[in-house]
Amino acid sequence: MTKKQFEISKQDIHLVEKPTHRARLVKAPEHFVPQSLIAEINSAGLDENRRGFLRKGFMSALAGTSAGLAAPFAVASGEGDPAILEKQEWQTTLGKNVATMPYGIPSIYEANLIRRESPGLTRVSAASVAFTPLQGLFGTITPNGLHFERHHQGWYNLNPETHRLMVNGLVKNPRVFTMNDLMRLPSVSRTHFIECGANTGLEWGNVAVPTVQYTHGMLSCCEFTGVPLSVLLQECGADLKKGKFLLAEGGDGSGMTRTINLDSALNDTIVAWAMNGEMLRPENGFPLRLVVPGVQGVSWVKWLRRLEVGDMPWNSKDEAVHYIDLMPNGEHRQFTSVQECKSVITTPSGGQQLLDKGFYNVSGMAWSGRGKVKRVDVSFDGGNNWHTARLETPILTKSITRFNIDWVWDGSPAILQSRAVDDTGYIQPSIKTLRNVRGTRSIYHNNAIQSWKLDTNGEVSNVQVG
């Protein structure tokens, strides 16, 4: 830390110590969309009128949340705080026994922190997305119960005793593995992010959703455990001279199959059965899924049942028709699977509200499908001036990196942005730069800088800037 940075940090701490500078932040409201509007959006789509109803409902809920939080703080700032001066129930009674809940669950006061489906995104929920609440997470690891979901024909609880994985194609010894067979092979545990190729896709044309859960929530980061793909192919005697591609086939009813470049897959791809120290959750592919670090989530095939080594791409339906980039000239660009360097500020972010002037810790996440995050810059004035944020350890390859930066809000309007740089030198682009190349008709691979507008009343909203 330089002398200047130390002096700034010391000044910020001094400001925090003053009661008038103890800044408060209101969480984004939940359940602001009535069921009647959800049904209408699902049947008729999301037009400008319904988009307006969403915004109106959101702002009404935000106002109610702010009003409800004012009273408790007022009590705490009086002559005496009952929470300190009076004995609480848990100080005078016997608590619950150990193993009251054999599998632990979050506090009842965290009940709103859940995955949520965006209304109108798909016609049926069995082929939809449940978004991770990034605004309420800390560090880099996504809890298993909050890992985002993306299904093409719903999820099942598969019996691990009867599940099988077949390896065939350009291999000397085609084999069928049981789960017991796989779990006896040498295993590794590695932490990587997974991001759907359509993450932030609703923002290509214009601002569409209010909170970071919906703009960036098709993103999670976990420690995955399994057998390296290279070990499995060696076990089967794969022909790595003729074999250039791998077909991964899932066991769900959608017939999900993806072509994967074998050269890059041999470096770090895992056939995984565990996530964050326990077996995969059913909605995340139990009992077996593919982990392809840095590549869009659709290639992380769930309920994995077959791997075939081949000498050319398969051009399956989900890579010839879907998960492709529509370019301005009308052409489709295929096999753009790598998730480019990207970042987003999660606190403060859309839907939240700052109640006071003063010190705030601005925090967010950065990631790159090509390697490690090298630097994150943060702007408070819409990109005119940038300040280098602190990167928190560990900084891992193809994983989420947490960044933080100190900021004292003086009550003026502001536009908060973050811009990540990875170790290949790639710099996260503005939305204008991305549109100049890709146009506005895409769905996939939007890694543009996200902008959050802060008004003088402390409300934070989603905007698009340069």
Image (tube, rainbow, N blue to C red):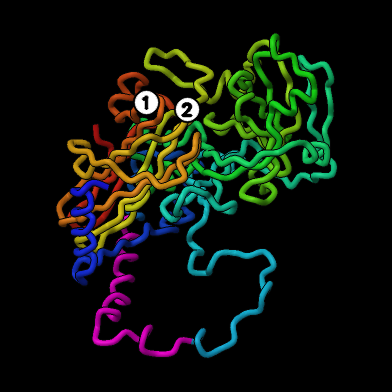
Q: Position of residue 445 (x, y in %)?
A: 44, 28
**Quadrant of the image occupied by residue 384:** top left
Instruction: Give how far across and how far down residue 72 sits, in percent.
Output: 32, 76
Q: Earlier in the sequence, mark 2 or mark 1?
A: 2
Front-most of residues 238 and 247:
238
Q: Hey, what amino acid is under mark 1?
A: Tyr
Q: Residues in magenta?
A: 59-88
- Crowding near the residue tagged with mark 1, few <14, some 14–19, many ≥20 C-alpha atoms within 10 Å: some
Q: Is residue 338 left or right of residue 327?
A: right
Decide which of 312, 436 is in the foreground and name it.
312
Task: Give how far across and how far down residue 356 sits, in percent.
Answer: 22, 63
| Main SS, magenta residues | helix
Secondary structure beneath disc 2?
loop
Question: Magenta span has 64?
Answer: yes
Residue 229 colored in magenta in the image = no
Q: Which residue is mark 1?
A: 426
Residue 223 appears left or right of 15 = right
Question: Distance between the Cα atoms at labels 2 and 1?
Answer: 9 Å
Inspect the image, locate mark 2, and give the three-letter code of the amino acid beneath it.
Arg
Q: Is residue 282 visible?
A: no
* Residue ID at (43%, 58%): 30
Mark 2 and mark 1 in contact? Answer it, CB < 8 Å.
yes
Rendering quarter of residue 103: bottom right
**Which quadrant would the C terminus be assigned to in this image?**
top left
The residue singled out by tag 2 in the image is: 370
